[in-house]
C-alpha cells in the first residue's frame, strides 16, 4: 500500500495551520497590494470561511482575470483571485511532496533548489561530457512542445494524478481548479501555481520515457523546453521521432516542429534566454531590452514611493546573478556605475558587485511567467 493511503490528505489540506501557511506564501512579495490588505482586515474570519467552504464541498473559485503580455512573445495570462491562490498553495503544500519524489533530477522548472541558472550550469556540464571536452563532435536536440499549456489533456492529467492520489475530495478540488479555466477538456491557465506544478507532473511521463525507455544519458527539461546531447546525430533524429510518437499517443500533445531541431554543438542556439556557443554565452537582445524596460518601470515606482530601495536592490542583485552567466562584464560594469549614480550612492558599487547576501529568489527574466 502506498504510504499516502495512510494519510488523510484532505484533513491536512483543510487544516487551519496549512491555510495560514498558504496565505503567507500567497502574500509573499505582495504585502502592499490592495487585495492582500483587504483580505488581512478580517484574516482569521476569511481563512475560517475558506476552510468551511472546503470542508463542506461548497468552495467555488472566482472567475479568472485574463490579460495579455508581450514580453517578448504574446501570451495570455490568467490570474486567480487572492483567496483562490491561497487554496492553490494549500493544495500544492500537501500533494507536491508526493510527486516530487518521482521527478527526475534534471527537471528544473518550478522546483525548490532548481531553476534557470541550475539548468544552464547543468547544460554546460553535459556539453563538456558529450563532446569529451570538445575533442569529438557532439550534437544537441533542442525541442519544445506545441502550445503546451493550451493542449494539456485534462482527462490524461487527472489519470496521472490519480496514480498517486486516491482521495476523491482532493481530486474534486483539482477538478474545480482546472474547470475554472473554462475549457473543461484541454488547457491549463498560464500564470497559476497549480498549472506550473501540474505541468511538471504531466511531463514527468516524458522524463521517464526518455531516461528509462530510451536510456538517454544527457537530458534536461525546463517546463516544455528540453534538450538531449549525443555524439551520434542519427540517434538524435531517431529520438525526436520516438519522443513525438510518445507525446501524441500517451499525452495527446506534440513537438513544435519549427522549434524542435538538431544543432551541432558550437553553433549558435537559444536556450533559456541565452544564445549558447561552446565557449561562451550571450544574452538575447530581447532579454537586455526587457531588463532595461523593467528597471525604468521600477525606477518610476520608486519615485512615486510605491516600492522601497530594497525592492530595487533585490531586482538588480538577482539580474546580475543571472547576467553573469553570459559574456556581459562590460554591460554590467557600466550599468552598476550608472545605478550607483542614479540612486545617490545609497549603496556602493563595491557592495553591489559583491552581490551582498545570498541571492534571493530570481523573480524576473524567467522564461515562464510565475504568478503565485
Image (spheres, rainbow, N blue to C red):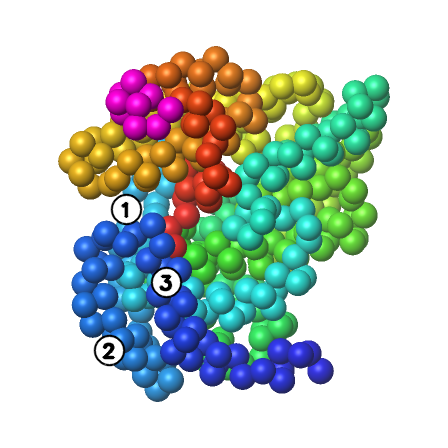
Quadrant occupied by the N terminus: bottom right
Which sits earlier in the primary sequence, circle 2 or circle 1? 2
Decide if residue 95 is in sight here: yes
Residue in view at x 20 percent, y 72 percent:
42
x%, y% of residue 149?
A: 47, 51
Q: Is residue 241 left or right of residue 270?
A: right
Disc number lying in front (1 or 3): 3
Mark 2 neighbour class, 10 Å CA radius: few under 14, some 14 to 19, many 20 or more: few
Name the quadrant containing residue 178: bottom left
What label does residue 67 carry, if any?
A: 1
Q: Which of 339/282 is in front? A: 339
Q: Earlier in the sequence, mark 1 or mark 3?
A: 3
The residue that mark 3 highlights is: 24
The quadrant the C terminus occupies is bottom left
Taking the view exactly as shown, the residue that stands out farthest to the left is: 304
Q: Which residue is mark 2?
A: 45
Q: Main secondary structure of the magenta part?
A: loop
Establish if 335 lies above or below 196. above
Give the residues drawn in magenta, as a range.
340-348
Amino acid at each position: 500500500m502506498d504510504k499516502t493511503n495512510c494519510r488523510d490528505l484532505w484533513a491536512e489540506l483543510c487544516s487551519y495551520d496549512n491555510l495560514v501557511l498558504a496565505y503567507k506564501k500567497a502574500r509573499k512579495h505582495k504585502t502592499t497590494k490592495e487585495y492582500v490588505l483587504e483580505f488581512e482586515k478580517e484574516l482569521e474570519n476569511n481563512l475560517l470561511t475558506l476552510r468551511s467552504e472546503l470542508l463542506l464541498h461548497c468552495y467555488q473559485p472566482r472567475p479568472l482575470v485574463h490579460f495579455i503580455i508581450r514580453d517578448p512573445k504574446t501570451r495570455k495570462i490568467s490570474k486567480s483571485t487572492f483567496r483562490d491562490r491561497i487554496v492553490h498553495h494549500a493544495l500544492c503544500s500537501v500533494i507536491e511532496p508526493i510527486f516530487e519524489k518521482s521527478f527526475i533530477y534534471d527537471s528544473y522548472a518550478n522546483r525548490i533548489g532548481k531553476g534557470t541558472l541550475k539548468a544552464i550550469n547543468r547544460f554546460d556540464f553535459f556539453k563538456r561530457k558529450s563532446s569529451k571536452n570538445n575533442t569529438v563532435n557532439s550534437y544537441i536536440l533542442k525541442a519544445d512542445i506545441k502550445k503546451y499549456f493550451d493542449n494539456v489533456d485534462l482527462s490524461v492529467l487527472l489519470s496521472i494524478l490519480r496514480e498517486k492520489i486516491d482521495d476523491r475530495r482532493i481530486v474534486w478540488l483539482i477538478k474545480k481548479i482546472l474547470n475554472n479555466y473554462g475549457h473543461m477538456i484541454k488547457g491549463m491557465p498560464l500564470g497559476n501555481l497549480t498549472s506550473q506544478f501540474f505541468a511538471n507532473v504531466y511531463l514527468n511521463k516524458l522524463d521517464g520515457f526518455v531516461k528509462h525507455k530510451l536510456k538517454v544519458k544527457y537530458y534536461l527539461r525546463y517546463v516544455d523546453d528540453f534538450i538531449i546531447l549525443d555524439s551520434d546525430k542519427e540517434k538524435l533524429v531517431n529520438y525526436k521521432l520516438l519522443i513525438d510518437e510518445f507525446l501524441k499517443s500517451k499525452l495527446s500533445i506534440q513537438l513544435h516542429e519549427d522549434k524542435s531541431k538538431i544543432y551541432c554543438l558550437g553553433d549558435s542556439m537559444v536556450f533559456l534566454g541565452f544564445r549558447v556557443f561552446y565557449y561562451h554565452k550571450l544574452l538575447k537582445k530581447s532579454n537586455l531590452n526587457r531588463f532595461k524596460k523593467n528597471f525604468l518601470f521600477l525606477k518610476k515606482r520608486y519615485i512615486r514611493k510605491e516600492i522601497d530601495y530594497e525592492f530595487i536592490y533585490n531586482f538588480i542583485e538577482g539580474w546580475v546573478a543571472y547576467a553573469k552567466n553570459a559574456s556581459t562584464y562590460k554591460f554590467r560594469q557600466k550599468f552598476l556605475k550608472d545605478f550607483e549614480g542614479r540612486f545617490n550612492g545609497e549603496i556602493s558599487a563595491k557592495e553591489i558587485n559583491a552581490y551582498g547576501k545570498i541571492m534571493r529568489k530570481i523573480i524576473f527574466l524567467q522564461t515562464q511567467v510565475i504568478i503565485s
